[in-house]
Amino acid sequence: MGRKKTFDEQMVIKAAIAVFSEHGYTGTDVGLVCERANIGRSSFYNTFDSLDTLFLRALREYTGSGTSLREELRTGTAPAPTLIMHRLGGELAKQCEDDKRIGCLSANTAAELGRDVDAVCTILDPDRRAWLETYSIVLERGQVEGHIRPDVDTKVHAELIYSVLAGLRIAARVMPADNVQAQASAFIEALCTPEGITALHNHTALNTYDGKAPGHLISTEGSAQ
């Protein structure tokens, strides 16, 4: 009869997400995960088989958390520019609050591994497609409402939003928080009509991002990040 587990498996996965985000795939070993999760090596191998197995589970769990965030963007009642600013500005402010500024496991993994590991691509590719679809929906709604420029190609700019956030996540690891926010704001303003810029500024006037309490530039029905 196998020994009964004495730890919470989800707690270990959460610890692994933090360790892999901080040290990367190649910079992480079993010892680092066990130390962060406060478990023994035997317990680790009895449950997860290998570090690669845990890494894929951690990455899948991390990307899965984006489902609720995408739903907030799809159902948000704020103007499209402020929804996009919430996504970029809010995530970047949250990252800059962290002394280590570790950032996003998905972005860090993509930067480190590229498309070299098929199992990683099978997790990141569907996640990316889901985000692109969501961004495209928000941009299209913004055009209907008159806040996003009509000449904006929603599919191309959905990809651009994805790429800009990924790049700013990397930049935010070393760049002053104000500079990161300024770049995010400038990018979003470039997508906007004059009415969209006014809507964005009116909303951000009531919701600020700073080192203590990032604002939430999203209005949703039934949930708030």
Image (cartoon, rainbow, N blue to C red):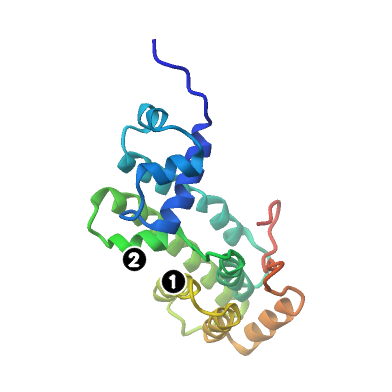
- Reading the image, the residue beneath label 1 is 170
Q: Give the Cα separation between the discs numbered 2 and 1.
A: 9 Å
Q: Which secondary structure, mark 1?
A: helix
For marks 2 and 1, the one nearer the N-term is 2
Q: Position of residue 58 (x, y in %)?
A: 42, 45
Which quadrant would residue 23 be assigned to in this image? bottom left
In the image, taking residue 86 as reference, residue 156 lies left or right, namely left
Say the numbered circle drawn on residue 190: none
Residue sitting at x 33%, y 39%:
53
Q: Are marks 2 and 1 in contact (CB under 8 Å)?
A: yes
Residue sitting at x 57%, y 51%:
68
Q: Position of residue 124 (x, y in %)?
A: 36, 55
Q: Residue furthest bottom?
A: 194
Determine if residue 130 is in view: no
Q: Between residue 45 and residue 210, name the one nearer to us.
A: 45
- Reading the image, the residue beneath label 2 is 111
Q: Position of residue 110 (x, y in %)?
A: 34, 62
Q: Which secondary structure, mark 2?
A: helix
For the C terminus, which image quadrant? bottom right
Q: Between residue 148 and residue 31, name the one nearer to us.
A: 31
